[in-house]
C-alpha cells in the first residue's frame, strides 16, 4: 500500500508546447505552463478555452498531437492515467468518486488496493490513522461516506489523493458543489498543504474570488492559446478578465419591469418518493406567478432533483396536483407545447441532449416539435441549419462546426446550446436547475440577463440553484428546500442571507 511518507513532497510539472488537434480543429495551440513545486496555480479561461483538454493531456487521457511534459525537470512519457498516477500526478473532479455505502477508512483503503493485492486491514488501518494524524485536517475514519456533507466529501477526495502519494493535484472546479464557507475552508487547506511543500496544485476555476484569495500564480487560456498569467498578487481581476475574454462588455441585467401577474404554476399536496426510496418529498402551496422568479435555494440532495423530475414527468407522484395556467399538468409534449412550458435541467448533456447528434440537430429539437404551425422543419435541413446557426451566434456557442456532435463541445458550451434552444420563442413557464453551473463569468452574466428578460416579458420562472448569490440576484421570492420540504418563503427584499443559510442547514 502506498501512503505518504514525509520525504515525499511537492513536484514541479511543466507542459511544454502542448498542442492538441481534434480532426482539423486545434483545441490547444502550443501551450506552455509551469506549475512550480509547492505552488497553488490557477488555470483560467472562458468556456471552450481548452482547460480540460490541457489537463487531460497532462493526466494521460489524451495524447497531445505535439509537445511534452516535464515532471520534476525530466521529460515524462504519460501514455495513460496510470502512468500519470505513477509519477505522482492526481486529479480531483467536480463530482465525487467515493463509494457512499462504505466508511471513510474503507474508501481510502480500497482506493490503494490495486497497488497491493490482498488487503491487510489491521495494518492498513494503523497506517491510515497515522496518515490522518499527519494532515492539517481530518475526517472521522469510521463515518459512512453517505452521511458526510459535500464539503467533507471534497476534503476526503483531496485526502485520498495525498494518501495515494500524489504530489501534484489537478482540481477541476473543485468548489462548484460546495457552499461558499465550505469552499473557503477547503481552498485554505489546499493552500496550507502547498505552503507546507506537500503538494503542488493546478486548479481550474471560473471564480476570480478564489484565484485572488488562494492562488499564487495564474495562467490564462483563450481559444486554445496561452494568453498571459503570472503572480496573482501582481494582477488585478480586471487584468485577468481582459486576458480571458478581451475587451468585451458584459451583458447588463435588465431592470425588473412590472409586478407579478396571475398564477402560472401551482403545486399542492404533492408527495413523491425520493431517489433513495426511503424518504418523501412533500410540497404544498407552491405558486409561481407570471412575471415572477421564484428561487429555491438549498443544498443539493434535499429534493430539488426529485421536484424537477416530477415536473418533467420522470418521477411519479403519489399524491397532489400540479396545475399550469389552471390546466392539469401531465408533462406530455403536447401540453408543454400548448402551455409554453420549458425545462432547463442540470447536466444538460445527459438530460437534455442527444449526445451523438450534431449541434444543429440538438438546437433544432424545439423546432422539430413544429412550433405549433404545422411547419415541418425537420424535412428542411437547410432551414434547421440556418435557425441553429443564428442561435449559435446569438448565444455565443463555441463549436468547431454545426455538424460536430454536441458531446464534443466543452461543458459550458453544451449549457449555452441548450439554453439557446429553450429560451427561444414564447415561454410562459420556465423551470430551471443550476443554469450557470460551470459557466465562465461572461456566460453567467449573459444567461442571467436572459432569464431576467424572460421574466420581464411575462414568463413565470421557477429557479432551483445551489448558488445562493444567483438566487438572491435573480429571484423575486426566495424559498429554501430542506429534507424534501419548503421551509422558508420570503419576498427577496425581506430575505436575509444568514437566515437562508440557517434554513439550508436544516433549521425549521
Ligand atoms: N474529444 C473532442 N473532440 C472534438 N473536440 C473537442 C473534444 N474535446 C474538446 N473539444 C473541443 O476543444 C475545445 C476546448 O474544450 P475544453 O473542454 O478543453 O474547454 P474548457 O476550457 O474545459 O471549457 P469549459 O469551461 O466549458 O469546461 C472546445 O471547443 C471543444 O469543443
Ligand atoms: Mg472544462
Image: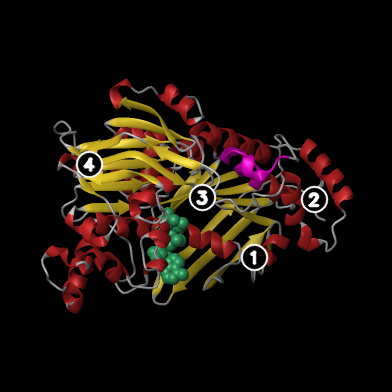
Distance of label 2 from label 1 (alpha carbons): 19 Å
Identify the residue under disc 2: 3
188 sits to left or right of 74: left
Q: Badge 1: how crowded within 10 Å, few (<14), some, or many (20+)?
A: some
Identify the residue under disc 4: 460
**Magenta region, mostly helix, strand or loop?**
helix
Q: Secondary structure at mark 3?
A: loop
Q: Between label 4 and label 3, give the one nearer the viewer.
A: 3
Distance of label 2 from label 4 (alpha carbons): 54 Å
- Write the residue at 36% across / 60% down: 352
- Write the residue at 30% across / 52% down: 343
Residue 149: in magenta span: yes
Q: Say whether residue 28 is visible.
A: no
Q: Between label 1 and label 4, give the one nearer the viewer.
A: 4
- Mark linked to residue 275: 3
196 sits to left or right of 414: right
Say whether disc 3 or disc 2 marks the residue closer to the N-terminus.
Answer: 2
Q: Nearer the viewer, residue 474 or 188?
A: 474
Span of residues in magenta: 143-157
Amino acid at each position: 500500500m502506498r501512503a505518504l511518507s514525509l520525504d515525499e513532497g511537492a513536484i514541479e510539472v511543466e507542459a511544454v508546447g502542448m498542442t492538441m488537434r481534434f480532426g482539423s480543429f486545434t483545441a490547444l495551440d502550443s501551450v506552455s505552463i509551469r506549475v512550480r513545486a509547492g505552488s497553488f496555480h490557477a488555470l483560467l479561461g472562458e468556456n471552450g478555452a481548452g482547460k480540460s483538454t490541457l489537463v487531460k493531456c497532462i493526466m494521460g487521457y489524451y495524447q497531445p498531437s505535439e509537445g511534452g511534459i516535464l515532471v520534476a525537470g525530466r521529460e515524462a512519457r504519460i501514455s495513460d492515467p496510470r502512468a500519470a498516477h505513477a509519477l505522482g500526478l492526481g486529479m480531483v473532479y467536480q463530482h465525487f468518486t467515493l463509494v457512499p455505502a462504505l466508511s471513510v477508512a474503507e474508501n481510502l483503503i480500497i482506493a490503494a488496493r490495486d497497488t497491493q493485492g490482498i488487503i491487510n486491514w489491521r495494518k492498513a488501518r494503523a497506517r491510515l490513522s497515522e496518515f490522518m494524524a499527519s494532515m492539517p485536517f481530518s475526517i472521522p475514519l469510521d463515518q459512512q461516506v453517505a452521511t458526510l456533507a459535500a464539503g467533507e466529501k471534497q476534503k476526503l477526495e483531496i485526502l485520498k489523493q495525498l494518501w495515494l502519494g500524489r504530489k501534484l493535484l489537478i482540481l477541476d472546479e473543485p468548489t462548484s458543489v460546495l457552499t461558499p464557507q465550505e469552499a473557503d475552508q477547503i481552498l485554505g487547506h489546499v493552500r496550507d498543504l502547498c505552503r507546507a511543500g506537500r503538494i503542488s496544485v493546478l486548479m481550474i476555476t471560473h471564480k476570480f474570488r478564489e484565484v485572488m484569495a488562494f492562488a499564487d500564480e495564474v495562467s490564462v487560456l483563450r481559444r486554445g492559446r496561452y494568453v498571459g498569467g503570472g503572480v496573482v498578487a501582481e494582477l488585478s481581476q480586471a487584468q485577468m478578465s481582459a486576458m480571458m475574454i478581451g475587451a468585451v462588455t458584459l451583458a447588463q441585467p435588465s431592470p425588473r419591469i412590472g409586478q407579478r401577474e396571475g398564477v402560472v404554476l401551482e403545486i399542492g399536496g404533492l408527495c413523491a418518493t425520493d431517489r433513495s426510496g426511503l424518504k418523501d418529498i412533500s410540497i404544498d402551496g407552491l405558486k409561481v406567478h407570471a412575471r415572477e422568479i421564484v428561487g429555491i435555494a438549498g443544498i443539493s440532495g434535499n429534493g430539488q432533483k426529485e421536484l424537477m423530475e416530477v415536473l418533467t414527468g420522470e418521477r411519479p407522484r403519489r399524491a397532489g396536483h400540479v396545475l399550469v395556467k389552471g390546466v392539469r399538468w401531465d408533462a406530455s409534449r403536447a401540453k408543454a407545447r400548448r402551455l409554453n412550458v420549458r425545462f432547463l435541467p442540470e447536466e444538460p448533456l445527459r438530460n437534455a441532449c442527444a449526445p451523438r447528434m450534431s449541434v444543429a440537430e440538438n438546437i433544432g429539437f424545439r423546432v422539430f416539435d413544429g412550433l405549433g404551425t404545422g411547419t415541418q422543419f425537420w424535412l428542411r435541413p437547410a432551414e434547421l441549419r440556418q435557425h441553429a446557426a443564428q442561435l449559435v451566434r446569438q448565444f455565443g456557442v463555441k463549436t468547431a462546426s454545426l455538424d460536430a456532435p454536441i458531446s464534443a463541445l466543452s461543458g459550458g458550451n453544451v449549457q449555452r446550446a441548450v439554453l439557446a434552444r429553450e429560451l427561444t420563442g414564447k415561454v410562459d413557464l420556465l423551470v430551471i436547475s443550476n443554469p450557470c453551473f460551470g459557466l465562465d463569468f461572461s456566460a453567467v452574466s449573459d444567461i442571467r440577463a436572459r432569464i431576467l428578460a424572460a421574466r420581464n416579458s411575462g414568463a413565470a420562472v421557477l429557479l432551483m440553484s445551489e448558488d445562493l448569490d444567483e438566487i438572491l440576484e435573480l429571484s423575486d421570492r426566495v424559498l429554501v428546500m430542506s429534507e424534501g420540504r419548503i421551509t422558508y418563503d420570503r419576498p427577496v427584499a425581506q430575505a436575509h442571507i444568514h437566515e437562508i443559510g440557517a434554513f439550508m442547514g436544516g433549521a425549521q
